[in-house]
Amino acid sequence: MVIVGVSAFFHEAAAAVLVDGALVAASAEERFSRIKHDPRLPVQAYRFCLEAAGVGPDGVDAVAFYESPAKKVDRQRWAGSSPPPGQPDALDPGRPERMIREHLGHAGPILTFDHHLSHAASAYHFSGFDDAAVLTVDGVGEWATTGYHRAVGEHIETIDEVQFPHSLGLLYAAVTSYLGFRVNDGEYKVMGLAPYGEPVLADRVRRLVRSTGGAGFELDMRYFDFVGGEQMYSAAFVDLLGRPPRRPGEAVDGFWADVAASTQLVLEELLLEKVAHLAGLVDSPNLCLAGGVALNCVANGRIRREGPFADVFVPPPAGDDGGSLGAAALAHVALTGERPERRRLAGAAFGPGYGSGEVTAALRSAGLPAEPAGPDTVADRLAAGQVVGWFDGAMEIGPRALGHRSILADPRDAAMRERLNAQVKRREAFRPFAPSVVAGAASAHLDLAWPSPFMLETCQVVSPLPLPAVTHVDGSCRPQTVDPDAEPRFAALLAAFAARTGCPVLLNTSLNVAGEPIACSPADALRTMAVAGLDALVLEGVLVEAGALPARLPELLAAWEPAPRRAVAEGRPGHLYSFV
Amino acid sequence: MHEELATQGLTVITVALDRAADAERWIAKAEPTHPSLVDEAHLVAERYGMVNVPTVVWIDEEGRIARPNDVAFTTDQGGKFAGVSTAEQMARLRRWVAGEEPAPEEGTAASAADRSPEAQAARAHFGLGWWLHERGSVEAANRQFARAGELAPGDFTIRRGTMRLRDADPFGPDFMEMVAGWLGAGNSYYLPLRD
């Protein structure tokens, strides 16, 4: 049975395929289209899934869509939405099915599931748990913004919900917007900024949102403008916090950090309260978290440490991209009566991969030396202070690079963080970097008593080594623990680095520059290398030197992309059109 | 036409439903003064319901289709093959640009895609085939192209348009055989619009 899950039309469109209940492939559309957070129907990700499953469009038994279009349109109309220019059918509940039929060529059944149920399934069905309490928290799905669920065996039952406009995700989004960052993109920046501030404005933030006890909470809508308005927050919000909104690019001073710290604290307090409430509803030692707010790794860390659950699972694609996995799992249950394969995800590498033969051949055809570079060679360079791109196997699903499309560096070098933020990633100086550590060595360096394979929780750094490049201003980090069984090549590299330096930790950030999706293909990786000024790039175990690159770059890229995606001739200057 | 009518607001855009690598030298040799596009994924064919080339579609300033796609040639010699008069088509185009042809009806969408299940399935098979071809899975790609052609036997942007990808010659014996088979079954290869 081949089931493809699809999430689309908001942000992070994605497709995921289950074959007889086993997750075979999953990817966000942005990885192929190269448009960050691409919300469009994931036509390319769908083709990728069909390729991975070895079927044509007529070999798909069912498409599972991650939310209920009719309910969503109800809410959008209630909130006063009107279709954006050029998309007259954007509020037509028949549009997702029509587009799936028309553009994916799927003639078979289409099953739709509620947005928060898809999130819940994206966590529970890939957690390996036999039972769990599931909390889903995001901006908004159809009407629900928070879901409380009980999962046992193949069943997930929604016990309670909080509905739009009361939303922790939209509260955080409003603050993100107020701080001059882009909504649905800059939330990480707010979280990263928070430790630079003090939560001195927490009482004011508590006037924006208050718990109503039990499952509930309310936003005070006098402070928000996202229902029927043009922006996220109202003039009263600005008055309450006491400063006009920060303009993008304006200096980030202590006030803005205090706003971030205060919002983060209030979010954490509310989530801890709601997790405790859920523990009273569901008799299970296990908690699953999903939805965009479950990407808040600082809150996740506190829930894990301070909450009542013995074990917590958050899937790597906790946002809307994960809705495709969840919907596919729900469809599998609906069609077979059985759970999908009950296995905890050990890794996130369900995206496209490129064979080493393909990479080697392309490098050779471009006249570049294609010498294999084992872990020792790469570790030597990292120990010498080089910044190295690391491209290995299938790419990750979800926002974190976990050793398949990564930029790696020495975490002991204090200057590395500045260099990476300024020159390589080209992003704000306050943004932290994360460490990857061999699982067995984690407890010697981190206050972490369990594996953290997906960088979805933070903890304190307790290392005897100075690790300034991966330690945030409050002494925390967002670690990836690397299990050698699940990630043998990355673990071998970490071991080789440890053998040279005594440090089993590497700085690991995603292989991209600010504003771009993570590199997917070898050509994307080479482009990133050139733009980011990496010292070297390891492509499927083959080392490319930065010095060899500039003159040969067009030739290299052509070797991978024989059909360049550009208009090949231009009529009038300034009028370049392209459909390809 | 592009140069003649540019001052009146007309832009000719040519679109090759082809691989860029195959189309590029032809475009370069023609040294066009108009924008020349390559549509490898057949997006234009899908949007405008094109099933054969050469064809022309008139699009007005509002993005509305002023005249749906219609077989067209640049010379009468080619036009004879399809039973259309090139001179007449050019005259009509001049009249449209001069505002002497009626504007399209209100609400005419800028899409004329064939939404029959077969056409949709054919495009999906073509799209997957193109994807697989790009990824180097030639045999798997050819199976998808073949299925697409079966589902939409009258869509020559697929049946002929994939010949280069399948190592066949779109001007050679395979093409002649395909057309002969199609005509032999009582079909027309070109279907000019009738006024």
Image (cartoon, grey):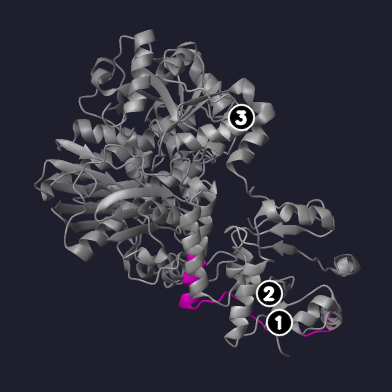
Residue B184 located left or right of residue A102: right
User: Main SS type for the magenta part?
Assistant: loop
Query: Which three-letter amino acid code belongs to the residue tagged 3?
Result: Ala
Q: Residue at x 80, y 76 (%)?
A: B78
Residue A530 bears which disc, if any? 3
Q: Which residue is mark 2?
A: B64
Residue B145 showing in the rendered view? yes
Q: CA distance from mark 1 to mark 2?
A: 7 Å
Query: Which three-letter amino acid code belongs to the residue tagged 2?
Result: Arg
Q: Secondary structure at mark 3?
A: helix
Residue A477 showing in the rendered view? no
Give the residues in magenta.
B98-125
Give the mark toward the camera: 1 or 3: 3
Give the mark toward the camera: 3 or 2: 3
Mark 3 vs 2: CB contact within 8 A: no
Tell me which chain the residue with mark 1 is part of: B
Mark 1 vs 2: CB contact within 8 A: yes
Query: Which three-letter amino acid code belongs to the residue tagged 1?
Result: Pro
Question: Can you give x and y, in whole percent of width and height, for residue A25 in the image?
Answer: 36, 48
Q: Secondary structure at mark 1?
A: loop
